[in-house]
């Protein structure tokens, strides 16, 4: 009986994209304030939607703080609500 040739494993490839930098840690911010509009705008898309954690590179707790602050700022009319799609 003939033996089958052994298959070698492929080398594990490095991640395609580098790890995201945590923006709040790089700015030195411990708590997020809803009145700090210029900082909150970095976490909002051009349509007014809150950017996801994958995009911003925030931790779960920081993303929750940002989302709460953005929602409070929207209630106070400091930030816009998400724009509806043009029809």
Image: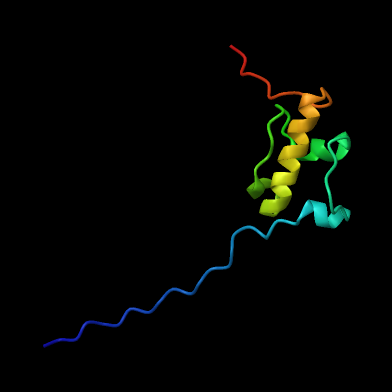
In this rendering, position of residue 68 left or right of residue 54: right
Name the residue located 62 percent from the left edge and 14 percent from the top edge.
Answer: 86
x and y percent of residue 12 in the render? 50, 72
Q: In which quarter of the image is the N terminus?
A: bottom left
Q: In which quarter of the image is the C terminus?
A: top right
In this rendering, position of residue 5 left or right of residue 68: left
Name the residue located 74 percent from the left edge and 35 percent from the top edge.
Answer: 44
Image mark count = 0
Q: Which of 27 and 65 is in front in this view?
A: 65
Name the residue located 70 percent from the left edge and 26 percent from the top edge.
Answer: 47
In the image, residue 80 above or below residue 41:
above
Q: Nearer the viewer, residue 44 or 77?
A: 77
x and y percent of residue 2 in the render? 15, 86
In the image, residue 52 above or below residue 18:
above
x and y percent of residue 49 in the render? 68, 31
x and y percent of residue 15 in the render? 59, 63
Name the residue located 79 percent from the left edge and 52 percent from the top edge.
Answer: 23
In the rendered view, how is the structure colored?
Answer: rainbow
In this rendering, position of residue 27 left or right of residue 6: right
Q: Residue furthest top?
A: 87
**Which image quarter: residue 21?**
bottom right
Q: Which of 1 and 71 is in front in this view?
A: 71
């Amino acid at each position: 009986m003939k033996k089958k040739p052994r298959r070698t494993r492929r080398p594990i490839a490095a991640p395609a994209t580098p790890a995201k930098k945590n923006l709040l840690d790089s700015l030195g911010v411990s708590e997020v304030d809803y009145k700090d509009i210029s900082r909150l705008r970095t976490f909002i898309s051009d349509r007014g939607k809150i950017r996801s954690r994958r995009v911003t590179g925030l931790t779960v707790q920081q993303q929750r703080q940002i989302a709460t602050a953005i929602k409070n700022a929207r209630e106070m009319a400091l930030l816009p609500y998400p724009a509806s799609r043009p029809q």
